[in-house]
Image (cartoon, helix red, strand yellow):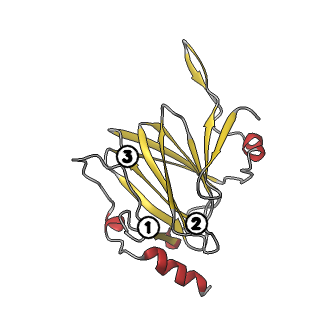
């Protein structure tokens, strides 16, 4: 190991990973992922799908989750800056319903590991951002759930600068409040 450092968060399972970056006057190099290093750091998951999105300033994607096919995710930003958030949806967790946020950027090169059964979302703070994430299960479009980004039940404190217009997809804009509790009740019946 030694190529990455791992910080734990106030919510069990969430981890912030910082790679060792080797730079000189030509630029830089780092391993954005190496299975053995991550396994040694307590992240042995096998990722089966990589995704990438591009968004302009003010775009807020989330808070999304898969209901029956939950995914572990390893997320990072390769261009720009985002505020990334995970919400604990594990029914047996002492931190159920709590959230944690971290600033991810092309400069800090940090990654955020989000285990299964967390809702996830991010807000673009720079003029433009490219966001990449690895998943341990394939996306199932009919299995998607979501929590309104501003649901008082969760209370995420997004760092929305004064004057910034938050831009949501139609689906995210129409999400009702109370989806964390509704999903928890639904899961109890499975």
Q: Earlier in the sequence, mark 3 or mark 2?
A: 2
Give the position of the C terminus as an image quadrant: bottom right
Displayed quadrant of residue 153: bottom left
Q: Position of residue 151 (x, y in %)?
A: 37, 68
Q: Is residue 117 left or right of residue 52?
A: right
Q: Nearer the viewer, residue 122 or 156?
A: 156
Q: Secondary structure at mark 2?
A: loop
Which label sits in the foreground, 3 or 2? 2
Q: Nearer the viewer, residue 99 or 119?
A: 99
Q: Secondary structure at mark 3?
A: strand
In this rendering, the answer to whether 79 lies above or below 55 is: above
Q: Residue at image x 37%, y 74%?
A: 177
Q: Position of residue 28 (x, y in %)?
A: 57, 22
- Give the distance between the C-alpha atoms of the residues marked 3 and 2, in whole angstroms: 26 Å
Q: Residue furthest bottom?
A: 189
Q: Position of residue 88 (x, y in %)?
A: 55, 65
Q: Residue at image x 51%, y 78%?
A: 183
Q: Earlier in the sequence, mark 3 or mark 1?
A: 3
Which label sits in the foreground, 3 or 1? 1
Q: Secondary structure at mark 1?
A: loop
Query: Which residue is identified by label 2?
Result: 95
Q: Is residue 28 left or right of residue 62?
A: right
Q: Position of residue 4 (x, y in %)?
A: 68, 36
In this rendering, the answer to whether 68 lies above or below 100 is: below
Q: Are marks 3 and 1 in contact (CB under 8 Å)?
A: no
Query: Which residue is identified by label 3?
Result: 124
Query: Which residue is identified by label 1?
Result: 154
The crowd level at tag 1 (other Cα within 10 Å; few <14, some 14-19, many 20+) is many
In this rendering, the answer to whether 12 lies above or below 18 is: below
């Amino acid at each position: 190991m030694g190529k990455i450092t791992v910080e734990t968060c106030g919510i069990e399972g969430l981890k912030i990973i910082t790679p060792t970056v080797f730079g000189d006057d030509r630029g830089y190099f780092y391993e954005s992922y190496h299975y053995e290093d991550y396994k040694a750091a307590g992240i042995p998951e096998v990722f089966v799908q990589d995704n990438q999105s591009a968004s302009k300033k003010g775009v807020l994607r989330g808070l999304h989750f898969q209901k029956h096919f939950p995914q572990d995710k390893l997320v990072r930003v390769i261009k720009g800056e985002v505020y990334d958030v995970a919400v604990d949806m594990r029914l047996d967790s002492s931190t159920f319903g709590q959230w944690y946020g971290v600033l991810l950027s092309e400069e800090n090169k940090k990654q955020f590991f989000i285990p299964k059964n967390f809702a996830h979302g991010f807000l673009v703070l720079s003029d433009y951002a490219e966001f990449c994430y690895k998943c341990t299960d394939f996306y199932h479009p009919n299995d998607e759930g979501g929590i309104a980004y501003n649901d008082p039940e969760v209370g995420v404190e997004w760092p929305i600068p004064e004057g910034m217009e938050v831009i949501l997809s139609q689906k995210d804009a129409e999400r009702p409040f109370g989806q964390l509790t509704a999903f928890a009740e639904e899961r109890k019946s499975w």
